[in-house]
Image: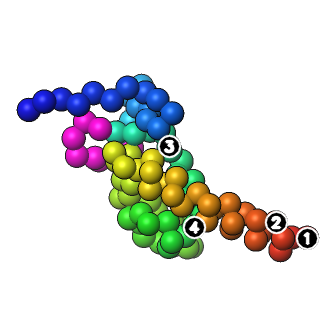
Amino acid sequence: MRRHIVKNSSKYFKNEECEYFPCHKVEGEYFNCMFCCCPLYALGDKCGGNFVYIEDGIKDCSACTVPHTENGYEKISSKLRAVSEMAKMNRNKDN
């Protein structure tokens, strides 16, 4: 089996020295830490990840591996406009 080594870049970063690494179980050696704190959390049930709501309505993303997978960067980047629109709506609501 041939190993595919990925170097740290603007789309990929692996921090094996993090005290929480690995924070999720992911198959294979590919593990992307680029979005350590997922920017899609605020999208609630529209984030596209594997999550559950626990008591008090808190979103538990511990079973979600989207940010850490090989195509995670692209998946997250494709939804950032929705996060931006949400922030814009909230800003307009406050004014």
Q: Does label 3 or label 2 sit earlier along the sequence?
A: 3
- Residue type at numbered disc 2: Arg
Looking at the picture, the colour scheme in use is rainbow
Q: Observer-nearest residue: 65 or 78?
A: 78
Q: Quadrant of the C terminus?
A: bottom right
| Residue at the (82%, 66%) spot, across then down | 91
* Residues at marks 2 and 1 touching, judged by CB atoms closer than 8 Å: yes
Point out residue 86 in the picture as x, y percentages from the top left corner.
Answer: 68, 67
Please, what secondary structure does the residue beneath circle 4 have? helix
Q: Does label 3 or label 1 sit earlier along the sequence?
A: 3
| Residue at the (52%, 52%) spot, across then down | 77
**1 left or right, relative to 15:** left
Residue 18 position by quadrant: top left
Badge number at residue 95? 1
- Residue type at numbered disc 1: Asn
Rounded to the nearest whole Å, what is the CA distance between mark 2 and mark 1?
A: 7 Å
Q: Observer-nearest residue: 9 or 27?
A: 9
> From the viewer's perspective, is residue 6 above or below residue 46?
above
Instruction: Tell me which segment is drawn in magenta.
Output: 23-30
Rounded to the nearest whole Å, what is the CA distance between mark 3 and mark 2?
A: 25 Å
The residue at which mark 3 appears reads as 36
- At label 1, counting other C-alpha atoms closer than 10 Å, the crowd grade (few under 14, some 14-19, many 20 or more) is few
